[in-house]
Image (cartoon, rainbow, N blue to C red):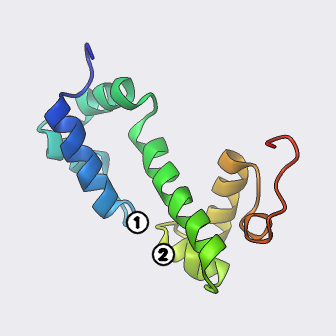
Amino acid sequence: MKGGLSVRSTRLVQEFLAESFTRKLALAEMAAVCGLSPYHFMRAFSRTFGMPPHQYVLDLRLDLAERLLADSRMTIADIAHASGFSSQSHFTTVMKKYRGVTPMQSRTGKLNPKIR
């Protein structure tokens, strides 16, 4: 894709993020995986994935959190921490904004009727 990441860089950054998304990540660290400046990485990543790196990482974290909410007896605070969110309240805010439900609603299966 013109202006996007190369196939190799795309694979490298996907592998890096799959292994690292639960910890604090700096844009410069992600860019270094591809050998690009943060500015060029941000533009190329967004063009390749259709979203900025921050949003991609949030989606990875929310996907993990939803799996943990469905499959485990962990507390919501522990799930927030395990998924890489700074706090339970940050996790709740992000999940409500991007998935339309709170962690408790997700756990109990009470989905937002607008999303169904």
For residue 46, what is the image quadrant? top left
Amino acid type at circle 2 is Ala
Query: In the image, what residue occupies the spot 39% across and 41% down?
Result: 53
**Alpha carbon of mark 2 to alpha carbon of mark 1: how far?**
7 Å
Q: How many tags in the picture?
A: 2
Which residue, given by chain and number where applicable, does mark 2 sit on? Answer: 82
Amino acid type at circle 1 is Thr
From the viewer's side, name the closer residue of 52 and 86: 52
From the viewer's side, name the closer residue of 5 and 87: 5
Find out whether the residues at labels 2 and 1 contact each other: C-beta distance under 8 Å: yes
Name the secondary structure under disc 2: helix
115 to the left or right of 41: right
90 to the left or right of 10: right
For residue 8, what is the image quadrant? top left
Tell me which label, 2 or 1, sits earlier in the chain: 1
Quadrant of the image containing the C terminus: top right
What x and y, as percent, mark residue 89? Answer: 67, 68
Query: In the image, what residue occupies the spot 65% across and 84% down?
Result: 75
Using the image, tell me which numbered label, if any, was put on residue 93.
Answer: none
Query: In the image, what residue occupies the spot 34% across and 27% down?
Result: 48
Using the image, tell me which numbered label, if any, was put on residue 22.
Answer: 1
10 to the left or right of 109: left
Whether 111 is drawn above or below 10: the answer is below
